[in-house]
Amino acid sequence: MHRMMRIVLLFGLGGLVVAACSSAGKAGSPITVEGPTRHVLHNGVRVLIQEYPSSQVVAVQLWVRAGSRDEAAAELGLAHYLEHMLFKGTTTRSKGFVDRDVEGVGGFVNAGTSLDFTYYYVVMPAARAVATIEMLADISVNSSLDATELELEKKVVIEEMRLSEDTPRRHLARQLYGMVFDGHPYGRSMLGTPEIIQKLTRETLLGFYRRHYVPESFTLVVVGPVDKAAIIQEAERTLGRLPRSGFQRLPQSLPATLTPKKNEVQRPGALAYLGMAWLGPKLDHADTPAVELLVSILGQSRSSRLPQSLRERQALVNSVSADYTPLEAGGMIMVTAQLESENLARAESETLREIRRIRDQGVTDEELRRAITGAEADHAFQSETAEGRARSFGRAETIWRLSEELAFIDRLRSVTPDQIRLAARRYLDLERYGRLAFVPPAR
């Protein structure tokens, strides 16, 4: 699911995943690449490997079925906080091991926390693949969680909260999640609250770590010019030695029906921000491909309906876009715009007018063709690097199904205009949506 991955899931852009962007070596001329192979170790660890000989580097990622949705009310922010702490030393690796063992040999490492998962990703010279698996296995269960480092990191995370609130689009998206998923774990802040973070103890964080970082929760993904047999052998030697915990992740309930809400908040600045949001289908729903294309037609390129109508023809907004974020238990469709505050009511009305047109008249064959072409381009872009391939595989195996990810582009190609029209009628209710506006103080 490739256009989704672009929307999705970076906290700095859409409010969902706390992560940083990185780059991996691009593939050379197109060659035939076999699909990924899937192995399950005796203790439940899943291993995905794709031999990708045209890459100059190897991508090694460890995915964990533990995100902010898994936190108890008193644990808000712990999934993200733990992600920060795992790079600060283990029982056998001193603080600074990232500088020495990764960056010192030309590699890159980072991590991201989502509502549904956490993942750790490394790009290294191909010869370092085995050593990288050993390092990720080590941090996954042997982090020292040093008490002094834990206290120092509190300032970093609280500053992250402040920066998130200071970025209007990011804060708008986060607040829309709270509206749409009110009362559901997806509606809570992934960073937690200053009060919880200030009081956080090593014992509390260690409890979360021990409970969720277990073999049954792990997926190891390796993509690059590697020897498959050597990768499996190292996975068995490291992650395969961990004892089963018996832990079973609790299934997440579906979000309740959205109660229409409208809110307006004063916020310093010269411009206003408008957000409109609806409940969408979850990741494995049959409607997901149609909604993906519907949102593309609405507002994911300059030629999409909302930018053309609201920005180019009517000059109501400085910018406008539509996004769809499918999660394991539910999804959200969102339209956001930056504009002058006097245009808020009209921009909302014109957005609903464009939605009504699709609900009543559908979309054209040309619009559908452009949306599918855009999805194909995103797929090609994701597949250019070992890192991009590994990320798609890991996310699918963690909260979806690998087979569905591999077939998703073909499913998009089979969507018809009638299916998009039906999806608009099913999900884009003209009355039942959340609406939030940030407005500058009165002059």
Image (cartoon, rainbow, N blue to C red):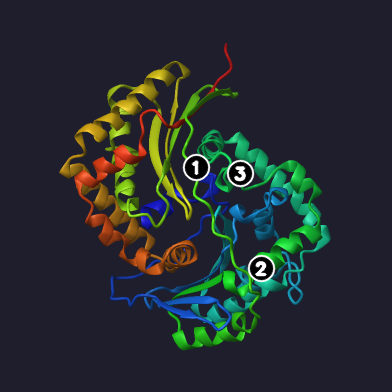
The amino acid type of the residue labelled 3 equals Arg
* Image x and y of residue 290, in percent: 29, 49
Left or right: residue 342 versus residue 162 is: left
SS for dot 2: helix
Q: Is residue 104 visible?
A: yes
- Please tell me whether residue 341 is drawn above or below residue 108 in the rendered image: above
- In space, the residues marked 3 and 2 are separated at their CA atoms by 31 Å
Task: State the quadrant of the N terminus.
Answer: bottom left
**The one of 398 and 234 positioned closer to us in this rendering:** 398
Q: Are marks 1 and 2 in contact (CB under 8 Å)?
A: no
Name the residue at 24% across, 30% down. 357
Could you tell me which secondary element the residue under label 3 belongs to? loop
The three-letter amino acid code for the residue at tag 1 is Ala
At x 61%, y 68%, the residue is 103
Mark 2: amino acid: Val
- Residue 100 visible somewhere in the drawing: no
Viewer-nearest of discs 3 and 1: 1
Residue behind mark 2: 98
Q: Which residue is mark 1?
A: 256
Specify which label sits upstream in the sequence, 3 or 1: 3
Numbered circle sitting on residue 192: none
Give the quadrant of residue 87.
bottom right
Residue 188: mark in rendering: 3
Cα separation, mark 1 vs mark 2, equals 43 Å
Task: Give the CA distance from mark 3 to mark 1.
Answer: 15 Å
* Residue 191 horizontal side relative to residue 106, left or right: right
Image spot of residue 46 (x, y percent):
51, 75
93 and 351: which is toward the camera: 351
- The answer to which of marks 1 and 2 sits earlier in the sequence is 2
Q: Quadrant of residue 164?
A: top right
Instruction: Note whether 238 is above or below 296 in the view shown.
Output: below
